Image (cartoon, rainbow, N blue to C red):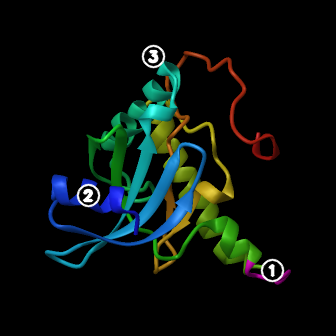
Amino acid sequence: MPLALTKMLVEFNMEDIEVIKEIGRGSYGSVWLVSRITDRRLLVLKSVRLSHLNSEEEKTARQEVHILAGLKHPNIVSYKGSFEMNHHLHLLMTYCEGGDLFTKIRHQHRTLFPEQQIIRWFIQITMALQYLHSHNILHRDLKTQNIFLTRSGLIKLGDFGIARVLNSSVDLATTMIGHHHYM
């Protein structure tokens, strides 16, 4: 575990968080599996290096926290807290033990999922999107890597890094963003 992350967590002492391992890394930062010592609950800590971002990217990173903090839906990853320290923005969220849908599909090795399973997942994704749209939020990066599964198979939509809040339900999003395979 990097000393910098350990130092940040010790200084913040957010409910006595213990770092378990890094579970992801991208151009803007990293994602860590952490545990709350008080109840041993597993959480995800997304850490974004603000010092490497321009002002627009920094605004977008902060907006992800604002959006996620306001969402309460069974099919959306839950916000558990956030803080800034040492030029990093940290976002705590629920951990989805089942991984992401992209990995689940890859591990099928060309075996088809049962139709009922696909329908259950599709309904849950649609319910999450309906909830977002009813709050004038566009996800804008809907792909299998951003659809997570709990241990029991419940779908949780995550990664609101490029989401957009519209002014009203008749407002239009005019920019093309996200992965072209999923547009």
Give the vertical position of 76 relative to 84 (above or below).
below
According to the image, label 3 marks what residue?
167
Task: Inspect the image, locate mark 2, and give the three-letter code of the amino acid beneath it.
Answer: Lys
Identify the image quadrant of residue 145.
Answer: bottom right
Q: Is the magenta stretch mostly helix, strand or loop?
A: loop
Instruction: Please tell me the numbered disc located at residue 50.
Output: none
Q: What element carries label 3?
A: loop
Picture coordinates of residue 162 (x, y %)?
55, 35
Task: Inspect the image, locate mark 3, and give the three-letter code of the amino acid beneath it.
Answer: Asn
Which label's residue is closer to the chain start, 2 or 1? 2
Q: Is residue 12 magenta?
A: no
Picture coordinates of residue 133 (x, y %)?
51, 35
Residue at screen point 59% across, 55% down: 146
Q: Read off the magenta span.
A: 107-111
The Cα atoms of the two marked residues, 1 and 3, are separated by: 41 Å
**Of marks 2 and 1, the one in the foreground:** 2
According to the image, label 2 marks what residue?
7
Residue at screen point 47% across, 39% down: 132
**Label 2 crowd (10 A; few <14 / some 14-19 / many >=20):** few
Which label's residue is closer to the chain start, 1 or 3? 1
**Label 3 crowd (10 A; few <14 / some 14-19 / many >=20):** few
Q: Is mark 1 on a helix, strand or loop?
A: loop
According to the image, label 1 marks what residue?
112
